[in-house]
Image: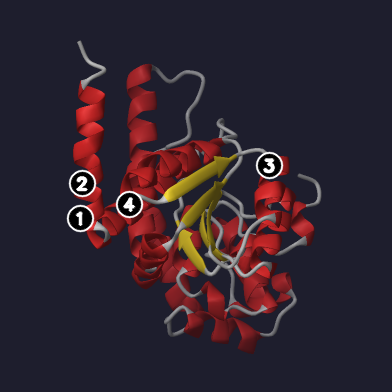
Amino acid sequence: MPNEKKYAYVLHDNTLAISLFSANSRLFTKADIKIANYISANLNHFLQMTISDLANATSVSEITISRFCKKLNLAGLQSLKIVLAGADSVNTFDKNISNNDNCQSISHKIFQNISDGLNNTLKLLNFNALDRSALLISKASRLICFGYGNSATVCSDIATRFVRLGISCEFSADPHQQATLSACSTKDTLVLAVSYTGSSVDLLNNLQIIKENGGKIILITSHTLSPASKIADEVLIGVGPEVKNNSEASVSRLIHMAINDVLYTKVSMLKKETFEKNMSKMRQSIAKLKS
């Protein structure tokens, strides 16, 4: 959407940089975000730069860059270069699909991307935020799922599964219906939003209404610095290396589903008695549909 960038700085899609920056991004100032954006968009060039070069390129001071590195628990710019260069050299396999690839090559590349994304996400997931999110869901009397496009498929999966736990679940991928649900929300409403960029204007407007009405928001996204992240009560980050000839964030969709699997498993443990009772009823009901 043309208006998305007015809301916030957003990291470019360099998975290695995002994985490193996301864990401490809540400490970032606007200057830090500017540095993070530059590095993630120009990783190879950054590895050859001095601190003065980076300061000139980002229009920030050298002291700001040093403080940025310390927020990442690194001694300085050289340590940051070593981490990113080391991570980049672990896998030099070309994971971008070309028109000459056969199904075997395509399979290897897509599966490798999914594996890399899951491993990177595991390193940067905030497990305390996961625990808090699971607790919010377990206590919710009403759960609403918001998402568009690929994210809508994740939301559909969430709504289908959490209803087994005795939680009233609603799912909408329509902005107008979301606006209606948001307007009628209360302090007892819990929204689980899924958004790859976290910058959709319609989603931001609806989440802001939820917030104003006293509701709680859990966000699953790939961009922790997004405007939606600033509105949400809990933010769960999942990143996936997307292939260049595929404009859809298909790998991240699977990673967001994996995060949902963790939430669902934890909530089922918190609501063990209800879960076991409902699963028994569900199996009996489905059995009647089989010949």
In this view, the mark in front (3 or 2): 2
Query: Distance of mark 4 from mark 3, alpha carbons?
Result: 25 Å
Tell me which amino acid carries mark 1: Glu
Using the image, determine if residue 242 lies above or below residue 274.
Answer: above
Q: Dot 4, how many residues are within 10 Å of its Cα: few (below 14), some (14-19), or many (20+)?
A: many
* SS at circle 1: helix
The circle on residue 277 is: 2
Q: CA distance from mark 4 to mark 2?
A: 16 Å
Q: Nearer the observer, disc 3 or disc 1? A: 1
Give the SS element for disc 3: helix
Residue 234 has which mark?
Answer: none
Q: How many marks?
A: 4
Which is more N-terminal, label 3 or label 4?
Answer: 3
Q: Nearer the viewer, residue 218 or 210?
A: 210
Is 275 in front, or is 53?
275
The residue at the point 39 percent across, 33 percent down is: 110
Q: Which of label 4 and label 1 is nearer to you?
A: 1
Three-letter amino acid code at disc 4? Tyr
Q: Residue 216's spot in the image, x, y percent?
A: 55, 66
- Any mark on residue 273, and which? 1
Among the 4 quarters of the image, the one containing residue 208: bottom right
Name the residue that disc number 4 marks. 264
Relative placement, left or right, of 103 versus 70 is left
Element under disc 4? helix
Circles 4, 1 touching at the beta carbon (< 8 Å): no
